[in-house]
C-alpha cells in the first residue's frame, strides 16, 4: 500500500471553507425568500375568513327596523302599531350582532325619512319588505347549524307575525 493514498481519500471527503460558505449563503438566501412566497412555512392562512352566513340577516334586521321607524315618524297615527315591530327588529339585530361579534351602528329614523307619504302605501311597502325578510329568515334557518337554528327560527316566526300585525 502506498503511503499518501489514505490522506488523499480523507482530504477528498472534507469540505473546503469556500464550499461551506457557498452552501451557507444559499441557505440564507433561501430563508430570506420564504416570506416572499405565497406559502407560510408555519401553516398560517393569511386569507380572511368568508363572511358569516347570518350577516345578511343582521343587515336586513337593521334595514327593517329603520324602515319601521321611518314610517312611524312619517305617519304618527301608525306609530303605536309600528314602533313595537321596529323594536323587535332592533332586538333581533342586537342578538345577531352579539352572536356574530360585530358592533351595531346607531339606529333611529332616517333624517328626512324614507317612508312613503301615503300611509297605505307605507304599509304595503312594509308588508313587502317583511315578506322578503321572512323568506330570507326561513331559508337561513333551514341551513343554519343547530346552535343557531333556534335564534334564526324565532326571527322567522316573528317576521311572520309582523305580517299579520300589518293587515
Image (spheres, grey):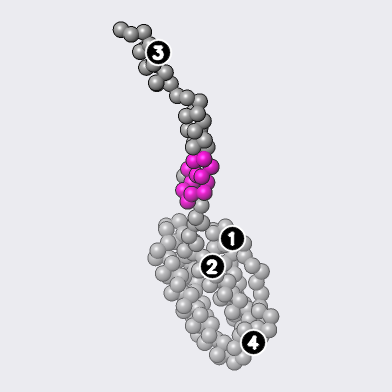
Cβ–Cβ below 8 Å for labels 4 and 1?
Answer: no
* Disc 4 element: loop
Residue 138 in the image, given as x and y percentages of width and height:
42, 70
Q: Quadrant of the N terminus?
A: top left
Neighbours of disc 2 within 10 Å: few (<14), some (14-19), many (20+): many
Cβ–Cβ below 8 Å for labels 3 and 4?
Answer: no
Q: In the image, which is nearer the foreground, mark 2 or mark 4?
A: 2
Cβ–Cβ below 8 Å for labels 2 and 1?
Answer: yes
Neighbours of disc 3 within 10 Å: few (<14), some (14-19), many (20+): few
Q: In the image, which is nearer the foreground, mark 4 or mark 1?
A: 1
Residue that label 3 marks: 7
Q: Is residue 5 magenta?
A: no
Q: Earlier in the sequence, mark 3 or mark 2?
A: 3
* 32 vs 89, nearest the viewer: 32
Residue that label 2 marks: 58
Residue that label 4 marks: 75
Q: Is residue 37 magenta?
A: yes
- Asked which quadrant contains residue 91, the reply is bottom right
Q: CA distance from mark 3 to mark 2?
A: 80 Å
Neighbours of disc 1 within 10 Å: few (<14), some (14-19), many (20+): few
Residue 62 in the image, given as x and y percentages of width and height:
58, 71
Please name the residue shown 47% across and 33% down the image: 23
Q: Which residues are the magenta region?
A: 29-41
Q: Earlier in the sequence, mark 2 or mark 1?
A: 2
Q: CA distance from mark 2 to mark 1?
A: 10 Å
Dominant SS type (magenta)? helix
Residue that label 1 marks: 102
Q: CA distance from mark 2 to mark 4?
A: 26 Å
Residue 143 vs 14, above or below: the answer is below
Whether residue 12 appears in this view of the structure is yes
Residue 163 in the image, given as x and y percentages of width and height:
49, 79
Q: Earlier in the sequence, mark 2 or mark 4?
A: 2
Amino acid at each position: 500500500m502506498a503511503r499518501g493514498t489514505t490522506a488523499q481519500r480523507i482530504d477528498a471527503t472534507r469540505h473546503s471553507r469556500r464550499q461551506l460558505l457557498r452552501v451557507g449563503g444559499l441557505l440564507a438566501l433561501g430563508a430570506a425568500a420564504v416570506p416572499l412566497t405565497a406559502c407560510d412555512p408555519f401553516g398560517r392562512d393569511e386569507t380572511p375568513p368568508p363572511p358569516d352566513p347570518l350577516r345578511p340577516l343582521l343587515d336586513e334586521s337593521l334595514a327593517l327596523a329603520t324602515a319601521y321607524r321611518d314610517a312611524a315618524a312619517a305617519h304618527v297615527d301608525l306609530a303605536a302599531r309600528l314602533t313595537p315591530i321596529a323594536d323587535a327588529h332592533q332586538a333581533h339585530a342586537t342578538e345577531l350582532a352579539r352572536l356574530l361579534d360585530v358592533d351595531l351602528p346607531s339606529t333611529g329614523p332616517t333624517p328626512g325619512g324614507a317612508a312613503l307619504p301615503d300611509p297605505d302605501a307605507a304599509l304595503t311597502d312594509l308588508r313587502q319588505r317583511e315578506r322578503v325578510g321572512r323568506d330570507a329568515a326561513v331559508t337561513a334557518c333551514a341551513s343554519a347549524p343547530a346552535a343557531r337554528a333556534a335564534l334564526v327560527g324565532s326571527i322567522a316566526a316573528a317576521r311572520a307575525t309582523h305580517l299579520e300585525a300589518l293587515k
